[in-house]
Image (spheres, grey):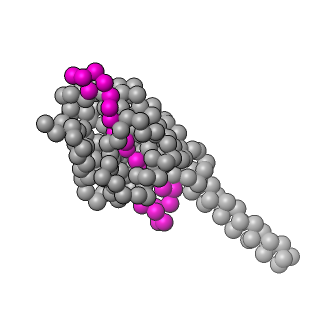
């Protein structure tokens, strides 16, 4: 009889562990990226998103015109122990010259477990031939380059200037993180 009581207790603990684990899997991890285009010269066009984990809940706007603001939402896949991790790029279309020579990139990492990892972000300007892929994400997450600036969330405003554009950005350190980005003309 005691053996059944012990077995029942173990089954209850195992069931509780499964419930706790399942609850952790449902933990929301999202990254909302808000882009305010304060440039009078550049329109953002042809967005591309690469995600290590996650999916676009709200797709990036096809165009972010001058003096406008747009946002998109990236979230982790449901019921997976993963975060919302990836990179978003837009071509910088010069309205005066009617061409796109550069692109901006936003790297974001909202990990599944904030006890082990922190939220990170980076913003930069690259040649328009730069692919939006894992290689770009790895460059912006792990490496150093004059093409971008990276910071841990909530450290401060991150500024990156690469003529003819300046990018100012911040990121919250929550599991439902927000990256706010503003584009400004340098001249």
Is 145 situated left or right of 77 in this image? left
Can I make out residue 175 in this image? no
The image quadrant that residue 81 belongs to is: bottom right
Q: Is residue 108 magenta?
A: yes
Asked whether 124 or 97 is in front, the reply is 97
Residue 77 is inside the magenta segment? no
Residue appearing at x 45%, y 31% in the figure: 59
Q: In the image, what residue occupies the spot 62% across and 55% down?
A: 22
- The quarter of the picture where residue 92 lies is top left
Residue 53 image offset from top left, x and y in percent: 54, 47
In the image, 125 versus 25, the foreground residue is: 125
Residue furthest right in the image:
1
Start and end of the magenta stretch? 94-118
What residue is drawn where x is 46% and y is 40%?
Answer: 132
29 lies left or right of 38:
right
- The x, y position of residue 102, in whole percent, is 32, 35
Residue 111 appears in the rendering: yes
Q: Nearer the viewer, residue 130 or 90?
A: 130
* Residue closer to the observer: 106 or 73: 106
Q: Is residue 146 above or below residue 33?
A: below
């Amino acid at each position: 009889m005691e053996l059944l009581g012990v077995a029942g207790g173990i089954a209850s603990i195992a069931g509780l562990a499964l419930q706790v684990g399942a609850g952790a899997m449902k933990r929301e991890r999202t990254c909302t990226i808000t882009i305010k285009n304060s440039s009078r010269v550049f329109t953002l066009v042809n967005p591309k998103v690469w995600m290590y984990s996650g999916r676009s809940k709200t797709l990036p706007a096809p165009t972010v015109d001058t003096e406008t603001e747009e946002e998109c939402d990236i979230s982790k896949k449901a019921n997976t122990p993963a975060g919302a991790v990836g990179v978003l790029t837009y071509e910088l279309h010069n309205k005066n010259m009617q061409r796109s020579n550069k692109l901006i990139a936003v790297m974001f990492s909202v990990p599944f477990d904030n006890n082990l990892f922190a939220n990170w972000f980076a913003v930069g300007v690259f040649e328009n031939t730069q692919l939006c892929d894992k290689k770009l994400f790895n460059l912006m997450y792990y490496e150093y380059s004059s093409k971008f600036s990276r910071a841990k969330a909530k450290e401060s405003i991150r500024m990156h200037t690469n003529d003819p554009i300046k990018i100012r950005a911040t990121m919250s350190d929550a599991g439902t993180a927000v990256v706010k980005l503003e584009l400004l003309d340098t001249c």
